[in-house]
């Protein structure tokens, strides 16, 4: 068997990676009138590392491929090419018991707490289902485990008797986190976990996730279109545009010295009053191009205030900026 070609990873993890994503590609075929079938380039050659115990933020506008990347990374959607290693194991090559054990280790925290639970089912029944599916414990032991995780997320045992509609949005999102913890995962992918919540509940859930990460030694991928969320909790941040990751940096560097024009524009558009963005960068203009036919060269060149001729023909390679940990894919990075 030939060894796989080396992959250009944009972001070496300092503490040793738990998750390595190598050149991951996921396109979806769609019918497109007279043109026949075309393909949505949802994820187009993404490489990432997530260190053990780290919270990596993944930000970008809606439709840039963040959620598809999450589902492909978890093995819930098969990749077209590339691979995902979890603790050194290629998840696509696992089968049977090994696949089941991997599934337990990697859990998804859903975006919308209301649609995450069956509206007619009491929370206790919904929470017992994953334990039963994995054949874990007796009925009594499963009840004890459910009480334990409810306590970990700040809910008392009586919540097992409630229907989803009898809970507030914040309580229900805590129950969603509890369900993700039931199987004692090592890695949580949180897909916009606070987007359906008000500001106060958003802060509570982010604080809770931060505490659980420390208590349980979890590694998190925090997906959000909201830069305030990633600034609150993440160690490093990856920025995604039209199916590609275009900048990765430790959180403080990304907010204080964003190097990619898209990151700069995202910062100016999302946090216009922040000291980092105020008056420094132009806000985002126009809509992203269709992922059915992403532009040649740099994908951001149709909206970039710094674009030059080369940007329309030549895709930029990764380069370091101030530190090895701060990497950017742009021909003309910097302020
Ligand atoms: Fe803008 Fe060119 Fe950099 Fe792309 S490569 S972000 S178009 S300056």
Image: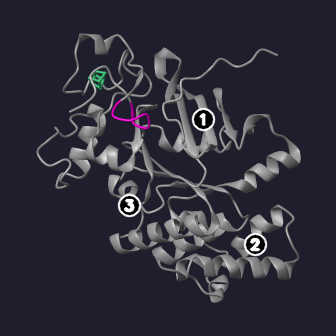
Q: Which residue is mark 2?
A: 128
Nearer to the camera, 36 or 328? 328
In the rendered structure, are the residues bearing label 3 and label 1 in contact, judged by CB atoms less than 8 Å apart? no
Quadrant of picture, ligand 1 = top left
- Please give the name of the residue rendered at 81% of the width and 51% of the height, measured from the top-left corner: 100
- Image height of 91 relative to 298, above or below: below
The x and y percentages for residue 216 are 64, 67
Q: Would you name the residue on which mark 3 appears?
A: 232
Which numbered disc, 2 or 1, marks the residue that appears first in the sequence?
1
Residue 99 location (% of width, % of height): 80, 46
Label 2's element? helix
Tell me: 305 left or right of 225. left
**Residue 185 placement (x, y as % from top left):** 69, 59
Residue occupying image coordinates x 83% and y 61% = 134
Could you classify mark 2 by the number of other residues whose Cα lies within 10 Å: few (under 14), some (14-19), or many (20 or more)? some
Q: Looking at the rendering, in which quadrant would you find the C terminus?
A: top left
Span highlighted in magenta in the image: 321-327
Residue 60, located in which quarter of the rendered image? top left
- The circle drawn on residue 21 is 1
Mark 1 close to ligand 1, CB under 8 Å: no
Is residue 137 shown left or right of residue 247? right
- Please give the name of the residue rendered at 84% of the width and 82% of the height, measured from the top-left corner: 140
Q: Percent x, y for residue 95?
A: 85, 41
Report the predominant secondary structure element of the magenta stretch.
loop
Query: Does 323 appear in magenta?
Result: yes
Check contact, mark 3 vs mark 2: CB within 8 A: no
- Residue beneath the point at 26% across and 46% down: 256
Mark 2 C-beta closer than 8 Å to ligand 1: no
Which numbered tag is attached to residue 4? none
| Vertical comparison of 272 with 313: above or below | below
């Amino acid at each position: 068997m030939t060894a796989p070609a080396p992959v250009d990873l944009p972001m070496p993890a300092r503490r040793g990676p738990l998750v390595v994503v190598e050149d991951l590609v996921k396109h979806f075929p769609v019918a497109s009138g007279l043109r026949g079938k075309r393909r949505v380039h949802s994820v187009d050659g993404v490489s990432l590392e997530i260190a053990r115990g780290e919270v990596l933020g993944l930000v970008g506008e809606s439709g840039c491929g963040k959620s598809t990347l999450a589902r492909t990374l978890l093995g819930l959607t098969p990749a077209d090419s590339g691979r995902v290693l979890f603790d050194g194991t290629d998840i696509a090559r696992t089968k049977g018991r090994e696949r089941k054990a991997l599934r337990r280790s990697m859990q998804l925290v859903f975006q919308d707490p209301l649609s995450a639970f069956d509206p007619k089912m009491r929370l206790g029944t919904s929470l017992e289902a994953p334990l039963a599916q994995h054949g874990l414990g007796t009925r009594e032991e499963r009840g004890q485990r459910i009480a334990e995780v409810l306590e970990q997320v700040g809910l008392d045992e009586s919540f097992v008797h409630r229907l989803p509609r009898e809970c507030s949005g914040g309580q229900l999102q805590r129950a969603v986190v509890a369900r993700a913890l039931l199987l004692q995962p090592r890695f949580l992918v949180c897909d916009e976990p606070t987007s359906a919540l008000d500001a106060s509940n958003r802060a509570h859930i982010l604080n809770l996730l931060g505490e659980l990460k420390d208590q349980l030694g979890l590694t998190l991928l925090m997906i959000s279109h909201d830069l305030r969320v990633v600034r609150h909790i993440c160690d490093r941040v990856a920025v995604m545009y039209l199916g590609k990751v275009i900048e990765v940096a430790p959180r403080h560097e990304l907010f204080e010295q964003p190097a990619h024009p898209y990151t700069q524009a995202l910062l100016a558009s999302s946090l216009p009053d922040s000291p980092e963005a105020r008056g420094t960068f132009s806000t985002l203009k126009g809509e992203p191009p269709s992922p059915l036919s992403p532009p040649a060269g740099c994908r951001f060149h149709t909206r970039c205030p710094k674009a030059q001729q080369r940007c329309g023909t030549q895709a930029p390679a990764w380069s370091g900026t101030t530190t090895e940990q701060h990497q950017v894919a742009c021909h003309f990075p910097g302020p």
